[in-house]
Image (spheres, rainbow, N blue to C red):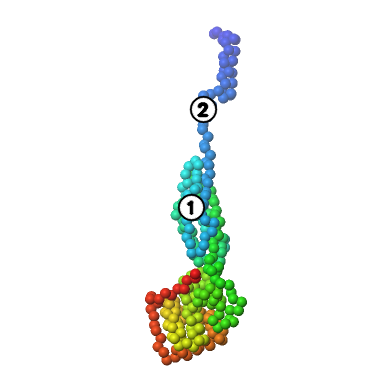
């Protein structure tokens, strides 16, 4: 048997050592082509456009169309309405994708609410934007101020000359803050009672006859609106208008003048039963 030469053994050992060293230093082909890192999803940006203030009995369109997503697309719009504890009004939000309609009905007072939009992108990220809106109650500002002495004269104070005593107008708004039709009907009734009181004070037969016809129209309007509750509703207005002894006496004088007379009847469908607040 022949022995392996010594120098050949050392050469082989040196070659094996170099191969091992290269492997340890990362010299393989796989290390020259690292796996690509996943891209980071950029968040979408929510945006909401609308007016700063909205008067009562108004509908406005709110838009989130300016919202964006720089590395994808928005797939969902989620709308939220926050009334901040205000519950004495008629406020609703009707979403429709990128837009929503805010409906503001009757308000008892001014209010500040919040509408928020949350957008969701195609990779599940979201962003939220909130818009603060002031809701404006209009009717109170249209009323005249409370008179210093509302009961000083039988006819009372009617500073805006609309046929209704100023103190009664203010009380009607307090009674029906969220119903403009009821306010207008009540104001019409108050105007008719004002004609009755004036005719009773003057004891003018012609004026009393005209006032009786107007009172019959008022009764028909209340029946058309309230049905079986018409007499109760009319009694509220009557009490407001006949709140002093002198006014009650004027009404009694009118009532006596109608004794034995035949009153007219009216169909509420043929009448204008509203007295709008100008």
To which residue does mark 1 refer? 63
The number of callouts visible is 2
The x, y position of residue 193, in whole percent, is 49, 81
Identify the residue at image location x=56%, y=63%: 111
150 over 7 or under it: above or below:
below
Residue 191 at least partly seen: yes
Q: In which quarter of the image is residue 112?
A: bottom right
Identify the residue at image location x=54%, y=63%: 136
Identify the residue at image location x=45%, y=73%: 274
Mark in the foreground, 2 or 1: 1
The x, y position of residue 160, in whole percent, is 53, 73
N-terminal label among 2 and 1: 2
Q: In which quarter of the image is the N terminus?
A: top right
Q: How crowded is mark 1: few (under 14 residues within 10 Å), some or many (20 or more)?
A: some
Q: Residue furthest bottom?
A: 260
Residue 175 at least partly seen: no
32 over 66 or under it: above or below:
above
The x, y position of residue 180, in whole percent, is 48, 70
219 over 142 or under it: above or below:
below
Q: Which residue lies furthest to the top in this view?
A: 2
Alpha carbons under labels 2 and 1: distance apart: 48 Å
To which residue does mark 2 refer? 33
Q: What element carries label 1?
A: strand
Q: What element carries label 2?
A: loop
Q: Are the residues at dot 2 and dot 1 in contact (C-beta closer than 8 Å)?
A: no
Q: In which quarter of the image is residue 230?
A: bottom left
Identify the residue at image location x=38%, y=75%: 269
């Amino acid at each position: 048997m022949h022995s392996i030469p010594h120098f050949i053994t050392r050469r082989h050992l040196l070659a094996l050592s170099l191969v091992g060293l290269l492997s340890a230093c990362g010299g393989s082909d796989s290390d020259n082509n690292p796996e690509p890192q996943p891209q980071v999803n950029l968040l979408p940006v929510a945006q909401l456009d609308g007016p700063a203030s909205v008067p009562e009995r108004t509908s406005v369109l709110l838009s989130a169309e300016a919202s964006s997503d720089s590395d994808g697309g928005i797939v969902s719009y989620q709308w939220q309405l926050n009334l901040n504890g205000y519950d004495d009004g008629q406020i609703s939000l009707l979403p429709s994708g990128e837009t929503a309609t805010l409906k503001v009905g009757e308000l008892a007072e001014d209010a500040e609410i919040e509408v928020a939009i949350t957008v969701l992108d195609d990779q599940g990220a979201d962003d939220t934007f909130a818009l603060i809106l002031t809701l404006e109650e209009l009717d109170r500002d249209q009323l005249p101020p409370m008179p210093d002495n509302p009961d000083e004269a039988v006819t009372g104070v009617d500073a805006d000359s609309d046929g209704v005593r100023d103190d009664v107008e203010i009380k009607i708004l307090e009674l029906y803050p969220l119903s403009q039709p009821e306010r207008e009907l009540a104001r019409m009734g108050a105007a008719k009672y004002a004609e009755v009181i004036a005719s009773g004070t003057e004891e003018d037969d012609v004026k009393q006859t005209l006032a009786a016809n107007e009172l019959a129209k008022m009764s028909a309007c209340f029946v058309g609106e309230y049905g079986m509750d018409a007499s109760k509703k009319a009694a509220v207005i009557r009490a407001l208008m006949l709140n002093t002894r002198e006014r009650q006496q004027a009404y009694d004088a009118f009532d006596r003048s109608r004794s034995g007379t035949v009153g007219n009847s009216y169909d509420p469908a043929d009448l204008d039963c509203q007295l709008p607040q100008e």
